Image (cartoon, grey):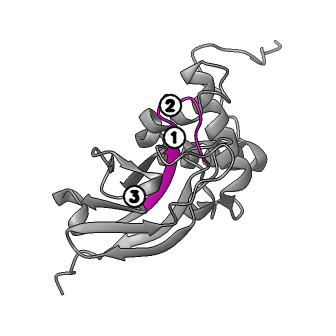
């Protein structure tokens, strides 16, 4: 008597080994999404022109740029290079950073207040602080302008005891034109270890 060899049985899950390439792409997407998702409100505004007016497409464009420009390494050791991440992009001329002053409670950035073609003294400066490890991201709430040459941010308590990334960018008064973001560095202090 001859037996039956089953080649399909919906009650038996298929154990399919995923390829190296697929695993690498999945890891890249997970890393990019995990880094950008907390910044979604900023990206929705600042990438809107690249998304042709659609916030979802804007986030997709920012995600694509991060994956192309800010990911390094090979699977399984891929990582994000924060200084290459653009949280905003556009044609507005960026600031010339002169100094970054950090203490445990405040972050101050001094920049050139010069205007140029397409730039105005009334362009608003936005300072963004973000700690993926702490799961906290925030931006400056008080208006600061290109002509001021200075912006100061009082750090919220969750960012006072941890490392965080700082970015700065500009937009015009109608929030139609944005500048490319500038990475100010990873600042802050490590939480003390209990040794």
Tell me how far mark 1 sits from mark 2, CA to CA: 5 Å
Nearer to us of marks 3 and 1 is 3
Measuring 66% from the left and 57% from the top, which residue is drawn there?
Answer: 71
- 175 in the magenta segment: yes
Image spot of residue 189 (x, y percent): 29, 76
Marks 2 and 1: in contact by CB < 8 Å? yes
**Whole-Å distance between the Cαs marked 3 and 1?**
14 Å
Q: Which corner quadrant holds the N terminus?
A: top right
Q: Name which residue lies at 21% across and 81% down.
A: 193
Near-viewer residue (194 or 170): 170
User: Which mark is drawn over residue 175?
Assistant: 2
* Residue 23 screen position, x and y as percent: 68, 46
User: Residue 192, image x and y in percent?
Assistant: 21, 80
Position of residue 128 in the picture relative to residue 28 (left or right): left
Residue lying furthest right in this view? Answer: 2
Q: Which is more N-terminal, label 1 or label 3? A: 3
Mark drawn on residue 148 = 3
The residue located at (38%, 55%) in the rendering is 130
Question: Is label 3 in contact with label 2 (beta carbons under 8 Å)?
Answer: no
Residue 60 showing in the rendered view? yes
Identify which residue, 192 or 45, lies in the foreground.
45
Which residue position holds label 1?
171
Measured in 3D between alpha carbons, the distance from the residue under mark 3 to the one under mark 2, in whole angstroms, is 18 Å
> In the rendered structure, are the residues bearing label 3 and label 1 in contact, judged by CB atoms less than 8 Å apart?
no
Magenta span: 166-179
Q: Nearer the viewer, residue 37 or 115?
A: 115
Crowding at label 2, few (<14), some or many (≥20) Cα neighbours within 10 Å?
Answer: few
- Element marked by disc 1: strand
Q: Residue at x 62, y 13 (%)?
A: 10
Apparent side of residue 153 relative to residue 113 in the rendered image (left or right) = left
């Amino acid at each position: 008597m001859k037996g039956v060899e089953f080649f399909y049985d919906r009650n038996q899950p298929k154990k399919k080994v995923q390829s190296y390439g697929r695993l690498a792409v999945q890891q890249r997407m997970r890393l990019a999404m995990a880094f950008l998702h907390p910044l979604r409100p900023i990206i929705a505004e600042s990438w809107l022109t690249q998304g042709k007016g659609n916030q979802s497409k804007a986030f997709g464009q920012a995600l694509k740029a991060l994956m192309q420009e800010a990911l390094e390494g090979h699977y399984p050791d891929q990582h994000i290079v924060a200084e290459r991440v653009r949280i905003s992009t556009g044609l507005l001329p960026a600031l010339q950073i002169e100094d970054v002053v950090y203490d445990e409670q405040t972050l101050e950035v001094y920049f050139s207040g010069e205007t140029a073609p397409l730039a105005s003294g009334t362009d608003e400066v936005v300072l963004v602080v973000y700690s993926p490890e702490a799961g906290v991201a925030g931006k400056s709430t008080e208006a600061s302008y290109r002509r001021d040459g200075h912006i100061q941010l009082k750090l919220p308590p969750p960012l006072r005891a941890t490392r965080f990334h700082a970015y700065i960018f500009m937009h015009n008064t109608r929030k139609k034109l944005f500048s490319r973001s500038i990475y100010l560095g990873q600042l802050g202090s490590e939480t003390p270890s209990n040794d």
